Amino acid sequence: MADDELSFDMEIAQRVCDAIEDSSKGLQRICKAEENFPSSRQFHRWLVESEELRQRYARAKNMQADLLVEQVIEIADDEKRDPNCRRISIDARKWTAGKLTPEKYGDKIELDHKGGIRLIPVTSEDEQL
């Protein structure tokens, strides 16, 4: 659908967010997959227009990060897949989850007293502190 043909529709926007939660795909691929979805460009325009949609989209991306982490475990346990393919798939999902929710899945940066930097993976124990 052309960008200028679809005016803001919260019901469609919700469906886009639902699709994000259930997929490891990016917004552009999700929007292209459904005929009545806006383009990713139009969806971004909707985000500018609606605070409610921005909040809903943020929750969807957070849930997508959780899905990616679950997929990491499934891929790691899949002994039928080539080890190199597993490693690449796992690394891509870990990186993406860390970028989507750095406070949850990103690396924690610590500075030592000598000015050095150390990247430390965030663990579930860190989240509880």
Image (spheres, rainbow, N blue to C red):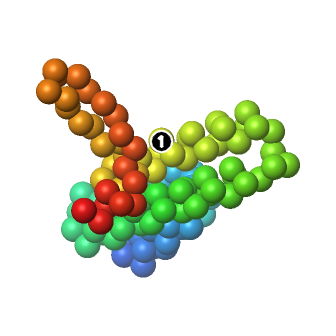
Asked if residue 87 lies left or right of residue 117, the reply is: right
Q: Position of residue 120 (x, y in %)?
A: 36, 40
Name the side, left or right, on which 25 lies relative to 82: left
The one of 83 and 118 positioned closer to us in this rendering:
118
At x 26% / y 27%, what residue is drawn? 117
What amino acid is at disc 1?
Answer: Trp
Residue that sits furthest to the right in the current view: 80
* Residue at x-position 54% and y-position 62%: 67
Q: Closest to the observer: 93 or 18?
A: 93
Relative image position of residue 59 (x, y in whole percent) = 36, 68
The residue located at (68%, 50%) in the rendering is 76
Q: Is residue 117 visible?
A: yes
| Residue denoted by label 1 | 95
- Position of residue 60 relative to residue 27, above or below, is below
Crowdedness of circle 1 by 10 Å Cα count: few (<14), some, many (20+)?
Answer: some
The picture places residue 90, in percent across and down from the top left corner, at 61, 44
In this rendering, position of residue 101 left or right of residue 115: right
Who is closer to the viewer here, 10 or 57?
Answer: 57
- Along the viewing direction, whichever of 18 and 41 lies nearer the viewer: 18
The residue sitting at 77% across, 53% down in the picture is: 78
Secondary structure beneath dot 1 equals helix
Res 38 seen here: no
Instruction: Tell whether 13 sits left or right of 109.
Output: right
**Which residue is at the far bottom?**
11
- Residue 35 falls in image quadrant: bottom right
